[in-house]
Amino acid sequence: MHKRAVIIFNLGGPDSLASVEPFLFNLFSDHDIFSIPVGQKVFARIISRRRAPKTKRIYEQIDGKSPINYWTEYQRQMLQKTLKKELPEIEVFTAMRYWHPIIKDVAEQIAVHNFDKIVLLPLYPHYSTATTRSSFNEWKRVYKGDPTRLIYVNDYFDNPHYISAINNRIDESILGFPEKIRSDIQLLFSAHGTPLRFVKRGDPYSDQIKKTVADVMAARNFSHEHHLCFQSKVGPLKWLKPSTAEMIEHLGAKNKKHLLVIPVSFVSDHVETLYELEIEYRRIAENLNIENYRVMKGLNDSTTFIEALKEITLKAMEEDMASIRGKG
């Protein structure tokens, strides 16, 4: 019997206020995002110390920790449960880029288990330098096992089950609006932004985000007016536009009163959804007299999303086997 494993990758997040600064240190130590020719660790230490007090105040408003750790573990358990119905021997592991269980520790654990095949499955549906590439690069640096046993999943932004999972959440969210105004709701797709320099280097992230939004809207027969914007900008570099704050202001100026914000590039709730969208941008909406402002819940416990991950995993394994047979 073949021993197979799936590694689901996510960014991770601080699990207490005390872990905020070391989490930030790990983040700013990432050379794929913050390319510092000399002194990366020194840079990371200085920036993490400066940012920690403000970041702690943010986490204090969302229960003192990131829920991304809970939801990733939940998704791991659900994916393992559904995969074991077809592959009883399979094991699913979580590897976090910036917090625990951190990639290095998981890679060491996987290497000693001697799995025949290992699927590397990011919980980032859209490929980006800052997420998928960074996680894969770190895995390659620390994994000491046989690299021919690895199966990489780069993206799944147009997977039908993933698209359905988003639409299911949209439909649930719309029911939270007063019935008489539901046809007037503006769908505001908010994706995590990236620096424009990534795009100029060929990063496909923004194009994949646009395709996801197009597929979601086509599946719902363009039921509402919709808009795409980008959030979470940090630093002085130019990032993808328009920003989510700018789009809310634009819609408010056009007297649009009912907004549903859809966190399109996130597969679970965390600080960018629970604080940035739910608290920070709500203030902007309220100041513009927007009457109904709601943020869609993350995919979190969506069984349809888990079905997407199962389908993607099995397809990756099948394609790997077909490739091996072709070479033979």
Image (cartoon, rainbow, N blue to C red):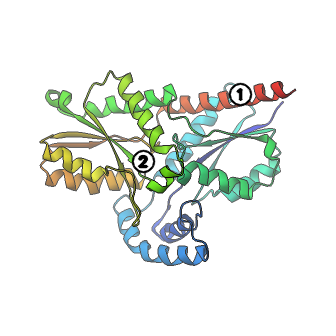
| Foreground disc of the pair 1, 2 | 1
Residue 42: in sight, yes or no? Answer: yes
Which of 244/293 is in front? 244
Relative to residue 115, is residue 9 drawn left or right?
A: left
The local secondary structure at tag 2 comes to loop
Residue 103 picture location, percent across and down: 66, 56
Q: Which residue is mark 1?
A: 319
In front here: 48 or 70? 48
Who is closer to the viewer here, 322 or 17? 322
Q: Which amino acid is tagged 1?
A: Glu
Q: Nearer the viewer, residue 49 or 238?
A: 238
The C terminus lies in quadrant: top right
- Residue sitting at 34 percent across and 50 percent down? 241
Q: Secondary structure at mark 1?
A: helix
Q: Earlier in the sequence, mark 1 or mark 2?
A: 2
Residue 239: x and y in percent read: 40, 56
Position of residue 20 relative to residue 220, above or below, is below
Mark 1: few/some/many CA within 10 Å (<14, 14-19, 20+): few
Q: Which picture quadrant has residue 98?
A: bottom right
Q: CA distance from mark 1 to mark 2?
A: 32 Å
Residue shown at the point (14%, 47%) measured from the top left: 253
The label on residue 113 is none
Amino acid type, callout 2: Asp
Q: Is residue 300 visible?
A: no
The residue carrying pointer 2 sits among few (fewer than 14), some (14 to 19) or many (20 or more) residues within 10 Å by Cα, namely many
Residue at 57 percent across and 33 percent down: it is: 309
Q: Which mark is residue 269?
A: 2
Does 180 appear above or below 134?
A: above
